[in-house]
Amino acid sequence: MTAITSDFSSAPVLPKWVVPVLLLAFAYGVVPLIGSSYLFEAILLPFLALSLAGVGLNILTGYAGQVSLGSAAFMAAGAFAAYNFNLRIEGLPLIGSIFLAGIVAAAIGIAFGLPSLRLKGFYLAVSTLAAQFFVQWALTKFSWFSNNSASGVMDAPRLSISGFALDGAIGRYLFALTIVSVLTFLAHRLVSSQTGRNFIAIRDNETAARIIGIPVLKTKLLAFAISSFIIGVAGVIWAFAYLRTVEPDGFDLDRSFQILFIIIIGGLASIRGAFFGAALIVVFPLVLSRLGGFLLGDLFDSGVLDMSQRIVLGALIILFLILEPDGLVALWDRIRRRLLFAWQST
Amino acid sequence: MPLPSYTLGVMEASAYAPEVFAHGLPSSPPEQQPAANGEPIGSVAGVASALLSLQGISLSFGGVVALADIDLSVRSGEIRAIIGPNGAGKSSLINVISGVYRPDRGHVKLDGAVYAQVPTQRLAHLGVARTFQNLALFKGLSVLDNVASGLAYKVRSNFAGQVLGIGRSRGEQRDSLSRAEQILEFLDLTSVRDRLVGTLPYGLQKRVELARALVAQPRLLLLDEPMAGMTASEKSEMAAFVRAARDRFATTVVLIEHDVGVVMGLSDRIAVLDYGRKIADATPDEVRNDQRVIDAYLGVASDNEDGAGI
Ligand SMILES: Nc1ncnc2c1ncn2[C@@H]1O[C@H](COP(=O)(O)OP(=O)(O)OP(=O)(O)O)[C@@H](O)[C@H]1O
Ligand SMILES: [Mg+2]
């Protein structure tokens, strides 16, 4: 690793692994001690699930350049598949159900990724809507998926790992954190591998990619599969760890857009960006409702909150697309460089 | 203008891209098959000197005739120029050779195998690499990664192996990076190896694209206006690189270029296209004195030196 040593000599740059390791140490060692159950239930659990979904979509859209509006469908597929594996296969450990759920989501992802072999951009986005509507329709139509439950809303199984119960707020947080960390690490490895570079090559110039011998069709379908696997597991975390119920309702088109906004605001083609974007999407409504309540008092009811949320979010997205197309990550890096520079020159 | 330093002594041609040399060619089936896309439709024995030949290639877009009954042969090891005014069909010809376009009529013979349409996806395996008239680099990748991507066709490890860093993936990765670095050094690009390619000046981007094509050590290199938009000194630098690449790797070069001065100095034989027809095909000296060429092209060469267009 000669590159790293030469970095050291020029500027006080930390090796790349330091920040993630410190963050993980904090998330495992400190947060469980100081966090309130509100922090876990309302902020960290949805944040983790949406971040992971963002990582998954970013592989497909940010890196491989294939726009998708079907993310929520893959989340739903993951959640329902994990529920059914857990219900119907005796003795399968929870982690096994989750893995198989990812595989199911990946298979559906490949099926709905087939149009990408012919379609691009806007047309592809529209065709991924088919996944969104089809999966939601199938889950409501066939009551087998929801174990014939009358309401269509099932309790998620209690989380445990080798008999060790994790169903308190902290336990569920640690469960989600572990899965998200592992998959994020693997995603990071993926995007810096040859396969990740093939994704970018296809995104940036498909003809040139084909000419130099990158297997374009195979690589696109692989991007769909991997992305859907990760989003499917994110769906399991959403249902099992955050909501603790499994139901089709929350996995609608709005959710698909939300995940797309997460990666646009956070930064396309950036693993960190998904976390930045998810943090903003989760924290922002909470801040807005506090702020609105503070400024407008009782006038600020849930209807007004919902509306103002959409308006401000819409404006934010437009602002980002115009002013900072590379997202919060780019903004953050710029600020950090400025600070470093200022600190060095004192 | 400094000539590139020949630092590639370590790279013996055979060690460098063994599979291209060993089995880069389709094992052409002897029976005549119907012209399925990308399948060789036959084979010819023992035309040793012609690495590439085109026979009766015609191509039109709607009413526009881009290529009309073109024959062209390219000998192993030569630098073969194609010139002609804007819209003459030069890029179309390269697109036919690289399989981007399927000709309406005619065949492409590539080292013994005959194709109705050259299989683009297998082009690299066949030992053919190309550059594009308009830059076709991967903007989101560094210079080094762009060049290394020219070896992507050889990668046999799968994504799981690469993610976990097991199996052959590590060796492949090390290999392609070191080969890419050697080409960067050969083309004097080492100082920009970690830059995002989109941040480089135009002339350097053109050179990176040449590096990406060269890294696979192709037997046939197709260059579509590699010097377009360059200053005079950049052009002669690029010309030196093209010649050096040919000498170093025994690569056969097909070159489209508008700057007649550069072309005359660089190429062994020149084909001249005009309105999709081949109006001359000879050595530089003969072409220079050909009246039809002068009428069609040379007389107006100074007007379109930079070759606007596709
Ligand atoms: N994909 C395409 N669709 C429609 N017409 C095309 C296409 N490609 C080429 N043509 C037409 O074919 C003719 C030859 O084009 P070509 O690009 O081969 O010319 P060229 O000799 O490379 O010109 P230039 O020097 O401007 O690059 C032109 O009339 C062009 O408009
Ligand atoms: Mg052209």
Image (cartoon, rainbow, N blue to C red):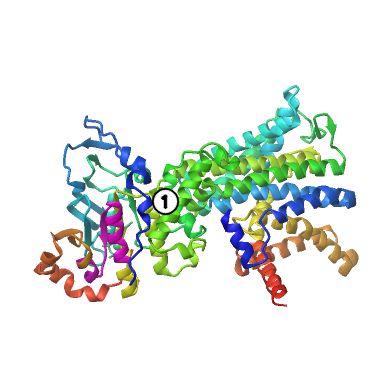
Span of residues in magenta:
B238-264
Quarter of the C terminus of chain A within the rendering: bottom right
Asked whether, in this view, residue A322 is left or right of residue A41, the answer is: left
Q: Would residue B241 be counted in the magenta stretch?
A: yes
The prevailing secondary structure element of the residues shown in magenta is helix
Chain letter of disc 1?
A: B
Snapshot quadrant of residue A154: top right
Regarding mark 1 in the picture, which secondary structure is present there?
helix
B205 or A113, nearer to the observer: B205
Q: Residue at x 38, y 61 (%)?
A: B187
- B87 over A174 or under it: above or below: below
Residue at the spot of label 1: B150
Q: Residue at x 82, y 62 (%)?
A: A287
**Label 1 lies in ligand 2 vicinity (Cβ under 8 Å):** no
Three-letter amino acid code at disc 1? Answer: Gly
Q: Position of residue B28 (x, y in %)?
A: 26, 34
Q: Position of residue A17 (x, y in %)?
A: 68, 53
Q: Is residue B17 visible?
A: no
Q: Quadrant of ligand 1?
A: bottom left
Pointer 1: residues within 10 angstroms few (<14), some, or many (20+)?
Answer: many
B149 or A295, nearer to the observer: B149
